[in-house]
Image: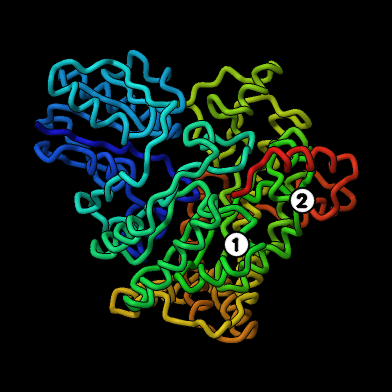
């Protein structure tokens, strides 16, 4: 029997990095980890083909398959429906699963043959047994069950064109101990982190390395959700890297409390982590209290980010505008906040209420949800909002967001944030080459230099040369610092391309002239108003930190 597994096309976003293609030859950020895991759970007598529309030019709608499997995030919803309809018109049964179907299976009712809600380790093998026996049900749900990750197989990246991606993704855990109001992860994966064994993770890392990957992203919702486990894993990863001459660079998503553990940061540097993604969200304490993100209020965000930078680890930030505590002055605050933090890359977006999240339920009870189809929304990172803002109009939200995203990706402002971050890097006598200095790497390096220096755009040339000089004359030399410089200078091409195409020319706005000007801006994240302290204490007591 033959199954055709499909990952639908994503619309362009800040984090898809299509603009890197002239440098790297890759077409998309990362492959579909979910489909690679589903393939590993599929019995050997099945013939499996994985197709990712983000790198493959076409989907073969004439494919000779017994079953079509489609995965989708909410931003892939409309495209997933189009694909399902074409295959069903040929009489080929279609099963839909993945994050969006698991969160909101009602969206696919009547639009596919089989809906699979929950973790694949539970559902997929059972569904295939029933399908082969001709007894498959239209709806399978394991939403109340949590898979034992120690029994999860190594993803079948051997079935994927890994050289078409910038990096490969793996998971070490599922679940997060925090309770952010807008987050759908805790709805699907729970608040108690479940982990794979250290041996499993090392085997998966080695599998990716053997597929030719030089970069791996751990797609956990919170890599340090279980801190004792994270320590054990990081020690093992450091040993693996050293024994194999550092074949791969690592990055992950985690919470800001990593900065409160120097031993974790030291281990991350030894394990060859070059970057982390942190949901910083807002400079306003009131907004953080509102969304129950108490972990971001416990210490100075400025000191925490600087400490992470000092370990040769750059920080990518999730930033949100549109909280109930945000007024029209938040855009200027966010810009100044990110500048001071030294965070070059941010997936800045407007707040969205995702299905079944506490945020959606609250807004629904308040009568503030809009009658908006998910097909009309692009997702986090775009100026979308599916509810009525509390302290500003839609026009003010869109105007402020457009100014903010363009300001953040001007040549000069991006350079300022990047230089700030890199000049915090400290040589802690644990230096090693963090990327293979082979012909492929050198070719990429020359392409980047050529793009910025050999052109007729004086602003582009100045951006590169001034940034280079400021980094060179800043903190002491280190290999890691310069690798990060060229990584983020190269990646800037993708950010700038996206912003120009979707929001407008970055230099068309002035950072000193925001659309809404407040006489004085204070770092409110550093000064918690007295009336917020009881709320913070209450949230802290209800938030488990493992």
129 is higher (above) or lower (below) than 282: above
In which quarter of the view is residue 99 placed?
top left
469 is higher (above) or lower (below) than 321: below
What residue is drawn where x is 39% and y is 29%?
Answer: 118
Give the residue at mark 2: 333
Residue 458 in view in this figure = no
Q: Which mark is residue 244?
A: none
Q: Is residue 358 found left or right of 146 in the rendered image?
A: right
What residue is drawn where x is 27% and y is 39%?
Answer: 38
Give the residue at mark 1: 344
What residue is drawn where x is 42% and y is 30%?
Answer: 100
Q: Position of residue 430 (x, y in %)?
A: 51, 82
In which quarter of the view is residue 350 placed?
top right
211 is higher (above) or lower (below) than 153: below
Q: Position of residue 303 (x, y in %)?
A: 73, 65
151 is higher (above) or lower (below) than 2: below
- Label 1 environment density (alpha carbons within 10 Å; few <14, some 14–19, many ≥20): many
Rounded to the nearest angstrom, the CA distance separating label 1 from label 2 is 16 Å
Q: Position of residue 240 (x, y in %)?
A: 36, 71
Q: Position of residue 270 (x, y in %)?
A: 48, 74
Name the N-terminal-most of marks 1 and 2.
2
Q: Residue most toward the top? A: 110
- Label 2 environment density (alpha carbons within 10 Å; few <14, some 14–19, many ≥20): many
- Secondary structure beneath disc 1? loop
Residue 128 in view in this figure = yes
Comparing 524 with 529, the one in front is 529
What residue is drawn where x is 39% and y is 73%?
Answer: 239
Q: Is residue 357 found left or right of 529 in the rendered image?
A: left
Q: Is disc 1 in contact with disc 2, using a CB cutoff of under 8 Å?
A: no
Q: Is residue 145 found left or right of 294 in the rendered image?
A: left
């Amino acid at each position: 029997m033959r199954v055709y597994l499909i990952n639908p096309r994503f619309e362009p976003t800040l984090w898809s990095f299509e603009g890197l293609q002239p440098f790297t030859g890759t077409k998309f950020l990362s492959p579909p980890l979910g489909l690679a895991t589903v393939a590993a759970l599929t019995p050997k007598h099945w013939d499996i083909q994985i197709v990712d529309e983000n790198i493959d030019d076409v989907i073969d709608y004439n494919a000779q398959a017994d079953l079509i499997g489609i995965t989708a995030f909410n931003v892939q919803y409309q495209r997933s429906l189009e694909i399902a309809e074409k295959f069903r018109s040929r009489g080929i049964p279609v099963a839909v699963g993945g994050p969006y179907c698991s969160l909101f299976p009602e969206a696919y009712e009547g639009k596919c043959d089989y809906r699979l809600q929950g973790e694949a380790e539970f559902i997929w093998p059972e569904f295939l047994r029933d399908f082969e026996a001709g007894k498959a049900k239209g709806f399978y749900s394991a939403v109340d069950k949590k898979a034992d990750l120690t029994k999860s197989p190594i993803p079948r990246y051997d079935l994927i064109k890994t050289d078409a991606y910038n990096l490969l993704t793996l998971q070490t855990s599922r679940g997060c101990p925090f309770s952010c109001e807008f987050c759908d992860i805790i709805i699907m994966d729970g608040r108690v982190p479940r982990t794979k064994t250290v041996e499993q993770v090392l085997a998966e890392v080695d599998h990716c390395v053997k597929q030719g990957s030089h970069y791996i992203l751990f797609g956990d919702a919170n890599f340090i959700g279980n801190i004792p486990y994270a320590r054990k894993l990081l020690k093992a990863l450091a040993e693996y890297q050293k024994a194999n001459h550092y074949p791969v660079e690592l990055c992950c998503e985690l919470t800001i409390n990593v900065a409160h553990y120097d031993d974790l940061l030291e281990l991350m540097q030894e394990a060859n982590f070059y970057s982390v993604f942190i949901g910083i969200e807002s400079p306003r304490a009131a907004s953080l209290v509102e969304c129950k993100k108490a972990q971001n209020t416990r210490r100075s965000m400025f000191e925490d980010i600087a400490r992470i930078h000092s370990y040769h680890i750059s920080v990518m930030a999730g930033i949100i505008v549109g909280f109930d505590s945000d007024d029209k002055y938040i855009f200027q605050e966010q810009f100044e906040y990110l500048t001071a933090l030294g965070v070059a890359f941010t997936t800045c977006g407007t707040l969205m209420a995702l299905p079944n999240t506490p945020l959606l339920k609250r807004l629904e009870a308040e009568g503030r949800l809009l009658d908006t189809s998910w097909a009309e929304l692009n997702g986090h990172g775009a100026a979308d909002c599916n509810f009525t803002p509390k302290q500003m109009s839609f026009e003010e939200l869109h105007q402020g967001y457009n100014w903010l995203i363009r300001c953040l990706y001007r040549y000069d402002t991006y350079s300022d944030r990047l230089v700030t971050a890199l000049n915090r890097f400290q040589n802690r006598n644990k230096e090693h080459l963090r990327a293979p200095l082979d012909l492929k790497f050198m070719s990429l390096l020359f392409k980047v230099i050529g793009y910025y220096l050999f052109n007729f755009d004086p602003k582009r040339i100045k951006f590169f040369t001034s940034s280079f000089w400021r980094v060179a004359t800043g903190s002491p030399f280190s290999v890691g610092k310069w690798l990060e410089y060229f990584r983020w200078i190269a990646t800037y091409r993708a950010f700038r391309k996206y912003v120009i195409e979707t929001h407008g020319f970055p230099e068309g706005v002035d950072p000193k002239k925001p659309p809404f000007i407040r006489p004085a801006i204070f770092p409110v994240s550093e000064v918690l108003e007295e009336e917020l302290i009881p709320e913070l204490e209450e949230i802290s007591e209800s938030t488990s930190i493992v």
